[in-house]
Image (cartoon, grey):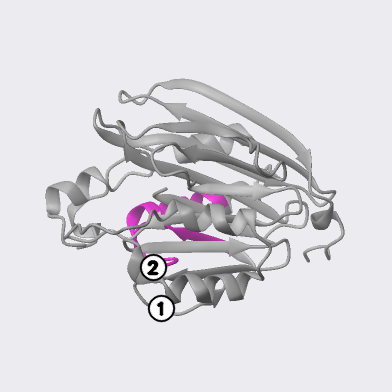
């Protein structure tokens, strides 16, 4: 997952809105979002190479997502980052305790940014530093740098999500259109993560088109103040054409029980 936009208690009607793109190599097998057999509370896609996932939610409102940290050098690590999301969703450890444990064992993984949440709180941590942070109510963005880093795709995504929240609301198709933005950033706006200017340019859009690597799926999760949740996942081929979609509507009563956002 290379872009996660989160509106956490930023709107009186929608306490949670997530819009995310998963960027990955095309030859890495994956299954679309579905309720997991080993725990029917968990709704998530599945990385069929290592068994983990990039983003998922539970019927009680517990959710998590992960991105890799972009670094110029790529090393080999014994464990998959997606395992962290799966382990959080399949377990019941408090978010802060889980995140602290994940960071303590972070050397076993490549660089990661991890979000773990309940209906009441969203926490962020990375094994590349910055500590553990609770997200304040508002709109946040996470790509392959630190949380809310001023990367072009993060800035553009946050601005777009704020505009949707201020307008007619976070409709699924409007959120999908935001995630489908394929505009490249100008050279002067690109971050320097050690991969070279040409690769920085190709990775700069919210949506990446590529035959070998690119945006594989877009996921939208919207939860309203009555606890009604809708998750839509759209899959894409190497030409950037939609080739599949799944939709899940369910209830998360814990959000209905929460305080209304002012």
Q: Residue at x 30, y 32 (%)?
A: 209
Mark 1, other Cα within 10 Å: few <14 / some 14–19 / many ≥20: few
Residue occupied by mark 1: 130
In the rendered view, tell whether residue 166 sits above or below residue 244. below
Q: Which range of residues does the magenta coloring cover?
A: 139-161
Q: Quadrant of the C terminus?
A: bottom right
| Depth order, front residue of 186/236 | 236
In the rendered view, tell whether residue 218 sits above or below residue 244. below
Residue occupied by mark 2: 146
Mark 2, other Cα within 10 Å: few <14 / some 14–19 / many ≥20: some
Please state the horizontal and vertical placement of residue 129, each as a whole percent of the image. Answer: 37, 77
Of helix, strand and loop, which one carries label 1?
loop
Q: Residue at x 53, y 48 (%)?
A: 55
| Depth order, front residue of 134/96 | 96
Q: Residue at x 25, y 58 (%)?
A: 189
Inter-mark Cα distance, 2 to 1: 8 Å
Q: Is residue 149 magenta?
A: yes
- Res. 212 image quadrant: top left
How many numbered circles are shown?
2
Task: Mark yes or no: residue 177 visible.
Answer: yes
């Amino acid at each position: 997952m290379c872009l996660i936009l989160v509106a956490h208690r930023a709107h009186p009607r929608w306490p949670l809105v997530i819009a995310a793109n998963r960027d990955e190599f095309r030859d890495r097998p994956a299954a679309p979002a579905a309720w997991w057999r080993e725990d029917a509370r968990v709704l998530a896609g599945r990385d069929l190479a290592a068994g983990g996932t990039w983003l998922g939610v539970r019927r009680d409102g517990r959710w998590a997502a992960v991105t890799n940290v972009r670094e110029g050098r790529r090393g080999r690590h014994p464990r998959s980052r997606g395992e962290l999301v799966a382990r959080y969703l399949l377990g019941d450890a408090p978010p802060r305790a889980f995140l602290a444990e994940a960071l303590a064992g972070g050397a076993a993984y490549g660089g990661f940014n991890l979000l773990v949440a309940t209906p009441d709180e969203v926490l962020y941590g990375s094994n590349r530093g910055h500590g553990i942070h609770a997200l304040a109510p508002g709109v946040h963005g996470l790509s392959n740098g630190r949380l809310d880093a001023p990367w072009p795709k993060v800035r553009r995504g946050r601005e777009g999500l704020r505009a949707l929240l201020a307008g007619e609301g976070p409709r699924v198709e409007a959120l999908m259109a935001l995630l489908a933005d394929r505009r490249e950033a100008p050279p002067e706006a690109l971050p320097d993560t050690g991969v070279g200017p040409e690769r920085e340019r190709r990775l700069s859009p919210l949506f990446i088109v590529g035959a070998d690597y690119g945006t594989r799926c877009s996921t939208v999760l919207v939860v309203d103040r009555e606890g009604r949740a809708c998750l839509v996942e759209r899959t894409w081929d190497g030409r950037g054409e939609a080739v599949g979609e799944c939709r899940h509507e369910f209830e998360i009563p814990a959000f209905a029980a929460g305080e209304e956002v002012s």
